[in-house]
Amino acid sequence: MYYLKQLALTMAMAAAASAAMVHPDSYSLFNGGISDIAFGDINFVDETYTGGTGDPLINYDLLEGGLGDLTDGIVSPDSWNVSSLPWVGWSDEFDINGANPTISFFFGQVHVFQMLRIHVDDTDGLMNAETPGTVEVSDGLLNLIFAIPDGGSGPQWFDLDITGLGGDALSLTLNQRAGYHWVFLDEVEFQADGANDPVPEPGTWSLVGIVLAGAGLMLRARR
């Protein structure tokens, strides 16, 4: 009886605590921009953006209802100055929509989020590009602010603990670091509690119920 109870408890805890990557159905943002550095203009737009409205080839155009570079699973090992793909970059020097860009992600169902991962670039000030000074993540009710260190160099991941946020949408704001004017992003990943559901799956609870019912029958038989 003791071991059956422990099995049921372990299964319930595993169902509640499991975490997995979840993917947005779409995201919306003001497109990236163009640089005018000495060795030629480079477009840092979300050129693979499709399935929504707006022109992915127009600097700072409003893109809505589609998916693109930021969730395609392609992570660049090189900085923006080595390969502009798949980096999306924003600057507050050329367009007001390039200041502290916000990307809104929309999911097909409610999630209980645990982690948000961003892959950003830091070229030690080249073209005034640095990691964001702070990152804000919001579910519309709760807003979390994370300070991002600037001690690294090149492309790097930052893991943000967003436990406490939930819902079917999240917004991510990249605030430019003081004294710098560009931020670069090429991938965003999400992890949620219970894989895709805010509560343990009904099938798991049914199995737990069967185990407990069997334990009850065994107890009555022994009595």
Image: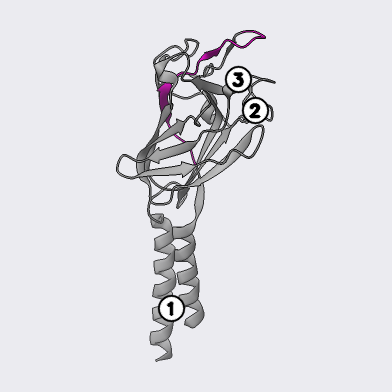
Image quarter of the C terminus: bottom left
Contact? badges 3 and 2 (CB < 8 Å): yes
Q: Which residue is mark 3?
A: 127
Q: Position of residue 185 (x, y in %)?
A: 54, 28
Above or below 164: residue 132: above
Above or below 80: residue 162: below
Q: CA distance from mark 3 to mark 1?
A: 67 Å
As shown in the figure, which amino acid type bears the numbered disc 2?
Answer: Thr
Q: Position of residue 114 (x, y in %)?
A: 46, 49
Residue most toward the top?
A: 40
Q: Secondary structure at mark 3?
A: helix
Q: Nearer the viewer, residue 156 or 202?
A: 156
Q: Which residue is mark 1?
A: 215
Among the two numbered marks 3 and 1 on one chain, the one whose residue lies closer to the N terminus: 3
Q: Residue at x 50, y 35 (%)?
A: 133
Q: Secondary structure at mark 2?
A: loop
Characterize the local packing of mark 3: few (<14), some (14-19) or many (20 or more) Cα atoms within 10 angstroms. Answer: some
Q: Residue 65: within the magenta?
A: no
Q: Residue at x 42, y 38 (%)?
A: 136
Q: Position of residue 188 (x, y in %)?
A: 52, 35
Q: What is the magenta range?
A: 22-40
As shown in the figure, which amino acid type bears the numbered disc 1?
Answer: Ala
Which is in the foreground here, disc 3 or disc 1? 3
As shown in the figure, which amino acid type bears the numbered disc 3?
Answer: Met
Q: Secondary structure at mark 1?
A: helix
- Disc marking residue 34: none
Q: Which residue is mark 2?
A: 123
Q: CA distance from mark 3 to mark 2?
A: 8 Å
Q: Residue at x 47, y 38 (%)?
A: 134
